[in-house]
Amino acid sequence: MTQPEKIPLSRPSITALEVALAGDAAQNGWGERCYDYIHRFEGEFARHVGVKHAIATSSCTGALHMGMAALGIGTGDEVILADTNWIASVAPVVHLGATPVFVDILPDTWCLDPDQVEAAITPRTKAIVAVHLYGNLCDMDPLRDIGRRHGVPVIEDAAEAVGSVYHGARAGSMGVFGAFSFHGSKTISTGEGGMFVTDDDALYEHVWTLSNHGRARQQKKQFWPDMVGYKYKMSNLQAALGCAQLQRVEELVARKREILQRYRQLLAGVPGLSMNPEHPGTTIGAWMPTVVFAPETGLFSERMVQAFVDARIDGRVFFHPVSSLPMFGSGHGAPQAADVARRAVNLPSFHDMTDAQIERVAAVIVQTLKTHG
Ligand SMILES: *Cc1c(COP(=O)(O)O)cnc(C)c1O
């Protein structure tokens, strides 16, 4: 018996444009021209997000690390994050010697609950990290209001939120700084890569210096760092891929939204399911279509993922509460964060997915709901 073709979770959309620009960078992007695609990608990305400054990095984790370092986050400080998160948003806090403080999420967006954030603020709070989970949007107005009232900057981790817009502002443009990821699984991809963005001139200059092994722009002496910095640079080759992807960003986001919409249609009549919300005044980039099973369905994430494995589909469990990981206390997690994690899965959503593949995924969900138990 022939097995059905495997459906991957994610993979980038690569066209002749990406191949042409990457080929040009490989052939010509050296010597005098070794920064051409990097500078072009930074400029065009800043314009896309609607901010003054952008610095291309080797990862989103690196962008977060440098931004947090430039804000002076260090030993004894606290940084508030949602308990529902990938460890990448948390690791830089730990590397800087600060303490991550995990708070619960809102049950519909799976992002920071502003009331819980306010309750967690102490005199040691140095930042709030708003992660736009799966391309859903954090409620930025109340979060920024809390930040203003307590004198605490709000950082945006927009790694999953290319194409997401909140009240007219793009994700990543609303915090003191924003960080993006171009990992192979993300909406626009350079294989590995990231971007630091900000409107703050002084913060930009500080991160620019940090990103250049501590060598300030005005330093004319060769090999003369002004501080101990970092090495989180993007290569010109990756930036060439990024320029091509960014040229296609509207198309790439539209396709993500179309795939989510198709899942919604196929699952519309099925009771006990909810998916990524899109609140009035917002547009989501739909990076990762996610289904939450209502408690009364009795269906849990692990069971659903097993059904996907059996059907040769690469589904994923929802992020575990970070506070349930061994290095953060092995607790049960905040109530909402723990509850949603047990009942939710991520669905495949790569751009080149066919309608037949989307239907196959939806059919496995419907069938498993009927027959599990
Ligand atoms: C992917 C991701 C990251 C990490 O991005 P890298 O580029 O792999 O460092 C950070 N935060 C979130 C929310 C992500 O989804």
Image (cartoon, grey):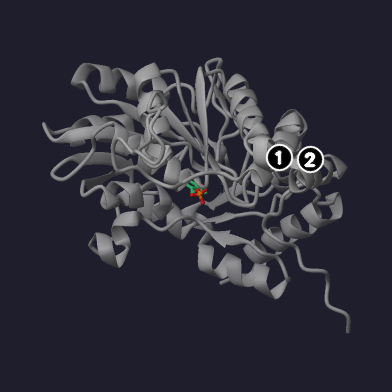
Which residue appears at 24% of the width and 25% of the height? 152
Q: CA distance from mark 1 to mark 2?
A: 5 Å
**Residue 42 lies in quadrant:** top right
Which residue appears at 16% of the width and 45% of the height? 75
Residues 276 and 123: in front is 123
Q: Amino acid at mark 1?
A: Ala
Question: Of helix, strand and loop, which one carries label 2?
Answer: helix
Residue 289 lies, in percent from the top left, at 63, 46
Report the quarter where the C terminus lies.
bottom right
Tell me: 10 left or right of 145. Answer: right
Q: Which residue is mark 1?
A: 240
- Residue 96 in view, yes or no: yes
Residue 59 lies, in percent from the top left, at 51, 47
Q: Residues within 10 Å of mark 1 (few under 14, many from 20)?
A: many
Q: Which residue is mark 2?
A: 21
Instruction: Judge whether 323 appears above or below 169 on screen.
Output: below
